[in-house]
Amino acid sequence: ATPPDTLVQAWTIDDIISLDPAEIFEFTASEIAGNTYERLINYDYKDVSKIYGEVAESWTVSPDGKTFTFKIRPNKKFASGNPLTAEDVAFSLQRAVLLDKSPAFILGQFGLTKDNVKDKIKASGNDVTVELDKAYAPTFVLYCMTSTVASVVDKKLVMQNEKDGDLGYGWLKTHYAGSGPFSIRDWKANEVVVLERNPHFEKKTPLARVIYRHIKETATQRLLLEKGDVDVARNLNPEELKALSTNTDIKVASGPKGGVWYLGLNQKNPNLAKPEVRQALKYLVDYSAIADTIMKNQAEVHQAFLPKGFLGAINENQYKLDVAKAKELLAKAGLKDGFTVTMDTRSTADTTGMAQAIQQTFAQAGVKLEIIPGDGKQTLTKYRARQHDIYIGRWGPDYQDPNTNADTFAANDDNSDGAKAKPLAWRNAWDPGPLTTQTRAAVLEKDAEKRAAMYKDLQQAVLDNGPFVIMLQEIEVMASRKNVDGIVIGPSFDTNSVAQAKKN
Amino acid sequence: MTKPLLEVEDLRVRFHLRTGIVEAVRGVSFQLGHERLGIVGESGSGKSQTGRAILGLTPPPGEVVAKRLTFDGIDLLTASKRTLRTLRGGRISMVMQDPKYSLNPVMTIGEQIIEAYQAHRKASRGEARDKTLAMLEAVKMRDPSRVFSLYPHEVSGGMGQRAMIAMMLVTDPDMLIADEPTSALDVTVQMEVLRILDELVAERGMGLIFISHDLKLVSSFCDRVLVMYAGHVVEELEARHLREAKHPYTQGLMNCLPKLKDDIRPLPTLNRDPAWAL
Amino acid sequence: MLDIQNLSVVFGTGRLRVDAVKDVSFHVEPGASFGLVGESGSGKSTVLRAVCGLAPISGGRVMVNGQAVKSPRDKSFYRTAQMVFQDPYASLHPRHTVDRTLSEPLAIHGEKNAEARILEALREVGLGPSFRFRYPHQLSGGQRQRIAIARALILRPKILLLDEPTSALDASVQAEVLNLLDELRVRLGLTYVLVSHDLAVVAHLCDRLLVMRQGEAVEETTAAALRSGQAANEYTRALIQASQGFARDGVEPVLV
Amino acid sequence: MTGAPLVQQPSGARAWLLSPEPASRWQARLGRFYLGWRAFSKNPLAVLGLGVVLLLILVAIFADLIAPYSPIIGGNLRTERLLPPSAAHWFGTDDLARDIFSRVVYGSRTTLWVVMLVAIIATPIGLAMGTVAGYLGGWVDTVLMRITDIFLAFPRLILALAFVAALGPGIDNAIIAIAITSWPPYARIARAETLTIRNSDFIAAVKLQGASTPRIILGHVVPLCLSSLIVRVTLDMAGIILTAAGLGFLGLGAQPPMPEWGAMVATGRNYLIDQWWVAAMPGAAIFVVSLGFNLLGDGLRDVLDPKAAK
Amino acid sequence: MIRGGGHAGALRFLLTKTVKFILVLATTLLGLIAVTFFIGRVVPIDPVLAIVGDRAPPHVYERARQELGLDRPLAEQFVIYVKKAVTGDFGNSVLTTNPVMTDIMNTFPATLELATLGTLIGVFVGVPLGVLAAVRRGSWIDQLVRLLGLVGYSVPIFWLGLMGLLLFYAKLGWVEGPGRLDVTYSYLYTPVTGVVLIDTLMQGQMDAFWNAVSHVALPACLLGYFSLAYISRMTRSFMLNELAQEYVIAARVKGLSEIRVIWRHALRNAAVPLVTVIALSYANLLEGSVLTETVFAWPGLGQYITNSLQNADMNAVLGGTLIIGTVFVLLNLLSDLLYHLLDPRTRR
Ligand SMILES: Nc1ncnc2c1ncn2[C@@H]1O[C@H](COP(=O)(O)OP(=O)(O)OP(=O)(O)O)[C@@H](O)[C@H]1O
Ligand SMILES: Nc1ncnc2c1ncn2[C@@H]1O[C@H](COP(=O)(O)OP(=O)(O)OP(=O)(O)O)[C@@H](O)[C@H]1O
Ligand SMILES: [Mg+2]
Ligand SMILES: [Mg+2]
């Protein structure tokens, strides 16, 4: 049994590699940062279009659309007891750019670089101003400011632990300097993360402690949950969830997430490069059967690259399993008898399950699919080198703005092998033609409605012709003990909140 | 010779093997008083099994039956395990062929002798030690206290065999079975060991069963000789009268040996008569 | 035929150094039979093994058939000298039939008509063709020793080195093997070097013999001298004495 | 010709086999084999083990005939997933609506392949390393044994994992990885055995006949090491199947949808508590076959390696 | 006199042994490093990805690659590796950001705890069982040991683990579930040795101690079973060998009780080869409990290395492998020493 003031969650947390918000980019760590750090602004978990200030009280945009000014709430304190000032906010944003870790590009896309960031981001009194290089769509800028990389860190504390001008990076990787509802007390890699109530947070959390335990086996997670040795199990599979549905001590909650499951069709493969083949394959996936069985409670059918809940997302699904149509298309492409193709598949239960289901429906039209299993890093390495035929994988948005997915699915500035940027379009060796320019234009469109329409067009183009068979949108499920209440499953992985969770 | 020490009548040792029953000893009968009895015969004739059966040490698939098997009036066949144990090592002992294999390699010689003594006599360690040293002295060990703390592999074959004799005689048994006690030793050492054995037997008045395949040796060492062939005794005779042996097997065994003194060639060989085995 | 001058054999170095044979010399005429006697560890086997190249020659000279031996020995050497080992249970490959054992030397030396040679070799050692396809475990000790002799003879060597060929055998079987050896030597004109710790066996088979002790040659003498009880050396006398059987003080050995 | 005379004289055939005077090489060999078989067949458990192994081979050969469904193409995902054992699906169905019985049947091929390939790769490597090191001694021995030690000191599963990672996942690579990690103990056994043989008189005897070193090693030393090695390899088979299963469990073994028992158990572990049959059926198959190999190895040990059987 | 000589001999023996040991250790470790290193380089996983993630911009990726030294020639990388490894610096783990040595110090005690308990069970149950089986050859106890052994060799460990959890934890509630300690107790003690059982006991936290015992019981018994299966069979075969020796008959001739003959004479001799077997099985448990650790959510070395390997965290893999290799060689040495201690014949 677990203590009444402690929430224990069973989860696979072996993807955490850093606790520094300037570096955090993984699912688990993002969620933890979401519960332990505050950002400048945030959006309403229920209605993503509503953006509100978290550390900022309010903000204004200059007429030319290039300067954003945030007014910081007074009297805020960090968990350390240090006051939270505009100085800390500016430092945090500058620091993210200066450290230039993986997520730094989210800020970098506004023309903020190591060299200019000290001039572009400034604190004065209670205000923080951010100066951009172009007049981007305000929604784009604001959504980016809600991501983990824009979390506010305790400048004083961090700089106390600075070493060799690393802006406290070495220290913060494994420590905590934030102002969120909880503070991070302990992280043991592959074992446990312990969060503890932040006494200085305005709205005192009902729970004193939240513990994430690393449990790899789902069956083990389930046993622990049923015995009450954990309060929440995060990685249960559909069958386990179904079995638990008869257990009156346990309830299941779910919410859609931004991740989409897709097949990437490498255009270097001559067969896959044929438009008819790309279309045919889209008719050869039994979307609903997969969503209803293998991925039940874990995903729902969704075929456009923007997930439900994003500005301009297309939520209608135009493809379904249609073998006859697929055969017709294949015949048109001169592949009446089908062809053989490989698929690099990460050897996790759900991915392999889907891959095998797809393998079966492909076979109905004569497409012989060979599954090449590998662990995540391995398949990814191959994918990034454009050496696959088909890649099955999941893509999660980096921030809440549609540009994040459009930029990767529909834009490709340089399709040569030596290209620097490696968006998904590039990885599949696809030159989207005019779509790239359209994507670039959409970021600058100030009118939200027009902007939405532009993204709809982009999605449709990819749906019709793109080398992506987008199949499902992720759903996050949590099975918890009956007495657990108040856990919020937000739309992205950094918005799962335990701040108001309690145990009755 | 008054009441015999050991009486054996129709002793049989059978092994129940997968391939059938092997009778290694088939109806051996003899009596032993305070004398030296030799048992000879070729390899596999059942000499060792006879000796072991008397001590109740026939290995597992084996079975011992006899009309009579008594030691000093005690029926060895029906005696309890406990009784047998007090007899073994206490009143009946056995010296085995090869000291290399029959001494426990991981215990010092002293310890092994003390262990044998303490198994039968209530004695403190000190007493047992003294007795052990005395015994080592009795078997003409040159530096008993040194030998006491040596491991079996650290002594020569002759020393090992003497240690073995010391171990087996430390409890003053009434009867000793010596199963080829010297055949692993060099001829010159062999004589030394035999001399020691001879002296001890004479001094203590023990009954001795001396098992060997060497007819020459047995006849010169023992009072009486049993000749075994295929599991039973083909002839029993006084050692002095060996030359007058009647059984062709015994005669053959004696004749086929090359002799220093006269040079017969070709050597006479043994023509086995199947009837001997019956 | 065989001439050994100042042979010494050393095994190991440093603390592990063993001087197995020290400065031993003897000479064997063609067609003669020479004996080596001594107790366990006196270096008898090592002398034979040194001749064959199974033990290192650390000093001295070994001449076979008038030629100094080469290391490693060449094929012609193996056709001149062959050895028979002490333990017939250990000297035959347990997984090879008699046929295989006997055909191996023929195959190595590329000899023709193996079939006939094998049958002949078997006949020579008094075994019929029915033994040809038996495995060692189907043979008695005496039969095994005969096979070992057949194997040694199949290449028609001139010298046979016999390392205690009968000491693992029962007395009755020993007689048969000794008779066989005796007869073969005469018939095939072989030269023997026989090792044994049994004086009677050596005296039976050899004309001359060398007594060894702890690697050294004690004395060279003749079988006739042994018979008449003449021995210069005390050690030799002790050996003679011991071979007579046990002697209680004052009592003469019963059997002589 | 009828079988009658034979039936009437069973002792005739046996007498021929056991003849102490075989008339030909073949008779000698058969006789030896028969003796071994007789000792072996006295051990009912060993015969059972042999039966299991033979069954495995038969099932692998006739998988096409035995399996009622395709092992790869499943049924309707909505209606035929995770069905419990029934008359239609003896072992039930798995998460992709495939018949588990058919998959187990086809999986026997993979298992057999694993077992055979490992035996063919690892045994000769171990044998060669061990006999050469043991026979030649000296620095050759030192070098070869140091290499063996290094491989022995390596965490076995990790070495296998590393090799699979390097070669890419897949059953053949898994097999190579397992083979590479399983030879060192064989080398040690072969060496130990060689050391006891190399100074024996019968080796000295062939040396005296002028045999070359390769001839001695191949013709005289190897056959004697082989029996204890065969026993050891047979006993290891279970471990090999389980290591393959373990690699499958970690996702590095056989490629889906190829039916491999270990991988099947690995999938099944997700359904272990409620849909027990998904893991239990292939698990039972692994167990039975391992047990079969173990029993067989035990029996072979009694026949081939009388030393160990004592 | 001989005693004195014995001591000097023992000393010299120890000395040569130590020198030899260091040589063996050095060459073995060098071999291990070489093999691991080159495996690490041929693995088709991009280690940079593990650090920067999939979505890192190109310049971040490039910088990380340079920091790892991956742009240098292979031979140079190897030399750097060896140089550092010799000073005990295996670098930092990519996954946990800690120095690999620290990680190993954190995870190894967990594995050690489990493997040690497993081996203890294996020895204290397996040896008597094996002895009994040998003494009562062919009896039911022999059959039982045989069966235990065969099942132990044949059952997949992860299957048995999950079934054990289901039965003893979920259904019967006899033991605590996966993990080393309930969260309630996690912060009641300060880790000193890293072995929870010892730490809690030393700090007098009896509740926590019993909780830890309850947690470790099932996985330890499971590993214990596997080691028992092996040890009992080997004990049996060694004992059969010893019981057939002449000295056992000699001991019986002396009139010793059967118990003394078996346990003091025969087992004492069988112990000599048994030591090696036990050390080997211990080494196997130390390295091979990856699957058990996964099932029981046991944060041990096996899991750590496997996880690192899958993420191309070569520093961690190398460090872990070297540690296990060292432990293996150490265990070898230990069993060698014990061998010499137990068997006077090998003391020269
Ligand atoms: N454990 C056993 N199982 C089956 N047969 C056995 C066993 N022990 C001995 N025998 C058989 O019993 C017979 C007699 O053996 P024993 O040891 O008494 O012979 P021996 O006369 O002492 O011979 P040796 O001179 O070789 O010592 C032999 O044929 C032998 O094969
Ligand atoms: N390979 C070897 N390495 C080291 N020492 C050896 C070796 N072979 C023989 N010796 C030693 O050489 C000495 C002579 O041995 P050898 O075998 O020649 O004696 P032997 O007279 O044949 O004795 P036995 O009658 O016991 O056969 C012995 O002390 C023996 O220990
Ligand atoms: Mg005997
Ligand atoms: Mg010799």
Image (cartoon, rainbow, N blue to C red):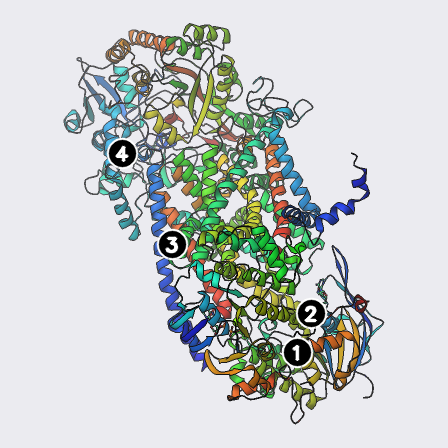
Q: In the rendered image, which residue does mark 4 sit on?
A: A153
Q: Amino acid at mark 4?
A: Val
Mark linked to residue B43: 2
Closer mark to the observer between disc 2 and disc 1 = 1
Badge 4: residue crowd in 10 Å (few <14, some 14–19, many ≥20): many
Q: Quadrant of the N terminus of chain D?
A: top right
The percent position of residue C212, horizontal first and vertical second, equals 49, 80
* SS under mark 2: loop
Question: Quick check: is the Cβ at mark 4 less than 8 Å away from ligand 2?
Answer: no
Label 3 – label 1 distance at C-alpha: 58 Å
Q: Is residue A440 left or right of residue E200?
A: left
Same chain for marks 3 and 4? no
Closer mark to the observer between disc 3 and disc 2 = 2
Q: Amino acid at mark 1?
A: Ile
Pointer 3 indicates a residue of which chain?
D
The reply to whether discs 3 and 1 touch (Cβ–Cβ < 8 Å) is: no
Closer mark to the observer between disc 4 and disc 2 = 2
The percent position of residue D109, horizontal first and vertical second, equals 56, 31
Q: Amino acid at mark 2?
A: Ser
Residue A22 or A362: which is nearer the viewer?
A362
Mark linked to residue B264: 1
The reply to whether discs 3 and 4 touch (Cβ–Cβ < 8 Å) is: no
